Amino acid sequence: MPTVNEIVAHMELLAPASLAEEWDNVGLLIGDMGASVSRVLVALDATASVVTQAEEWGAELLVVHHPLIFSPLKNLVEDGGVVTLVRRLLCNCCGLLACHTNLDSAPGGLNHYVGELLGLQQLRPLALDSGLGRIGTLATPVSVAEFTARVAKILATDTLKVLGDPEKQVRTVALCTGAGGDFATAAQAAGAELYLTGEVKHHIALLARDAGMAIIDAGHYPTERPMVPLVTAHLRQLAGVEVVAAVEEEPWRRE
């Protein structure tokens, strides 16, 4: 079976740590590089539910997108939150590996993967200074309504918010998984007729509407959840380790 170090090295092939934003906290956050690993659990977040799944299954490593340890910890007093989850992982000898903006920006990473799932071709980075986001073209134009239905199906969500004429035909589409509202201006400047992301602020939506660019706000969780099958498939290339996707649920629901 591989060691934690070997798994970290394998993840570097998919999501080099050097691609992470300066403010991010990626890599091995908990664990022993020399420890052997036979079971890996992959999740978007190290929530209480996911940590429980890791405990019950006996995982020696949890690979997540969002870093559990992000802001500096000033003490290790039980708080029912981050410190408690860190203690539980340590007590169960389960390491924690985070691949966040490095996976977002990687050439074959999350944004590229979601773009391909949605049928975009000729994908290239949206933010040239960081590599975040992607912009590409559809083989044939579709209406905003048709593309919205495609997004809902591919991302398995019914909590979409859509801005723009449903009948408008679009071919050039930009996307940024997660909270990518701030890249809407870059999407417009790059010639996108539609921009897909999550957590779009009100004033950003108004500017996009005035500019005639459609926006689909599919939410943070749905746009990033494809990280799990992407990373799971990558880690299954390693021999001697069982890799399983955690059971997670979208936090928001439509009433």
Image: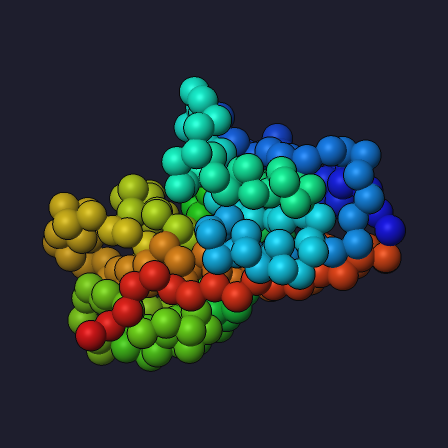
Q: Is 158 left or right of 78, judged from the image as shown? A: left
Residue at image location 62% in from the left, 54% down from the top: 55
**Structure colour scheme:** rainbow
Residue at image location 55% in from the left, 37% down from the top: 87
Residue at image location 23% in from the left, 65% down from the top: 161
Q: Is 236 left or right of 166, judged from the image as shown? A: right
Determine if residue 114 is in view.
no
Q: Is 95 left or right of 205, judged from the image as shown? A: right
Q: Is 13 left or right of 89, judged from the image as shown? A: right
Determine if residue 151 is in view.
yes
Residue at image location 79% in from the left, 54% down from the top: 38
The quadrant holding residue 238 is bottom right
Q: How many marks?
A: 0
| On screen, residue 158 above or below 232 | below
Image location (x, y in percent) of residue 12:
70, 40
Image location (x, y in percent) of residue 33:
76, 33
From the viewer's side, name the closer residue of 180 and 42.
Answer: 42
| On screen, residue 87 above or below 54 | above
| On screen, residue 81 above or below 253 | above
Q: Which quarter shows the C terminus?
A: bottom left
Image location (x, y in percent) of residue 94:
66, 44
Q: Residue lying at the far top in this picture: please name it.
A: 74
From the viewer's side, name the closer residue of 67 and 18.
Answer: 67
| On screen, residue 77 above or below 199 | above
From the viewer's side, name the closer residue of 204 and 63.
Answer: 63
